[in-house]
Amino acid sequence: MKKILFVCIVCVLSLLGMSHVVSAQEYAPQAGDKMVSLRLGKAVSVGYVSYNSVNQVANGSQNTYISQPNSVANDFTNNNIVNAIGIEAKYFLKSNIALRFAGSGILSASPAQDVTEGVQDPEGINYPGTTIPAFRHLEGKATKQFYLDLGADYYFATKIARLQPYLGAQLNSNYGQLEIFDGYRGLDAGGEVIPTYDTRRGEAYGLGGSVVGGVDYYLAEGLFLGLEIKAASYMYNVNRIFHQQGMEAQDAATHNTSFLTQPVIKLGFKF
């Protein structure tokens, strides 16, 4: 349904744009122009931290491990192609040179829940409803995740006024963090408070660069639909896990090189 609605909107905008005749000069960007577009796609480089890797000690693991960072080419979200993955902004220094910025992020927090002590048949009558059930504690979690791209594009002149192809280079970065912390965990068999594992933390980050190619097609004056792909990309990704407070971090790194990956659709405005 989302895809059908998206296609219908594009078709209507195209018809509106074709009915309005403007000169090539009005379509082509000029020095000082600005662009803002919504990025739609499935692939984006983000910092992902595995819950199992961070929480191994609390789960009773005797041999901790750390997973290798995912390849950028295989780092897909579960969204379909019409889901937003970020916002992009451009500023034209000249009519054919633009600075670019793209990014998105998310912050999420869930507080810890203390254990609820149960009481078995407090009146000793063994009757339904006289038992107070116990509830296990819930671990608290805090998640940070974002990506940021900075670069510049060079626009090529064409004989088609509405068509604006470009080639660009950009620096790519991403960061993710997962913190897990405990509340009150209850009493042991001796009536002593069960100690917590305090805060366990994991981080993932990536740094790299890419060459991008794309094209903007103007549906109307100031309104365009774009398509972009990373022609070549390199990312250095690191997973870092602090299994327990006071312990040194455990790291795992991956060098990723990819070609013709991460296609993105853009719907934006020039003003």
Image: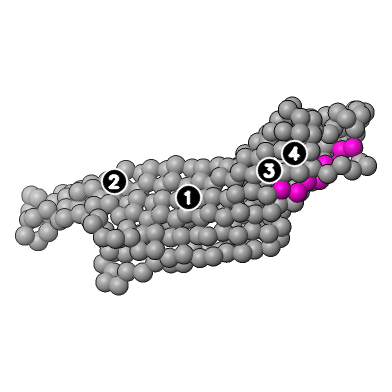
SS for dot 3: strand
For the residue pair 80 and 152, the one nearer the viewer reads as 152
Q: Measured from the top left, where is residue 206 in percent x and y?
A: 51, 55
The Cα–Cα distance between marks 2 and 4, rounded to whole angstroms, is: 50 Å
Residue at 76% in and 30% down:
31
User: Disc 3 marks which amino acid?
Assistant: Ala
The Cα–Cα distance between marks 3 and 1, rounded to whole angstroms, is: 22 Å
C-beta proximity under 8 Å, tags 2 and 1:
no
- Decide whether residue 30 is among the magenta residues: no
74 over 212 or under it: above or below: below
Q: Measured from the top left, where is residue 176 in percent x and y?
A: 45, 51
User: To which residue does mark 1 refer?
Assistant: 175
SS for dot 4: strand
Q: Measured from the top left, where is residue 219 in percent x and y?
A: 83, 36
Residue at 23% in and 48% down:
183
**Sequence-first disc among 2 and 4:** 4
For the residue pair 77 and 68, the one nearer the viewer reads as 68
For the residue pair 131 and 143, the one nearer the viewer reads as 143
User: To which residue does mark 3 refer?
Assistant: 152
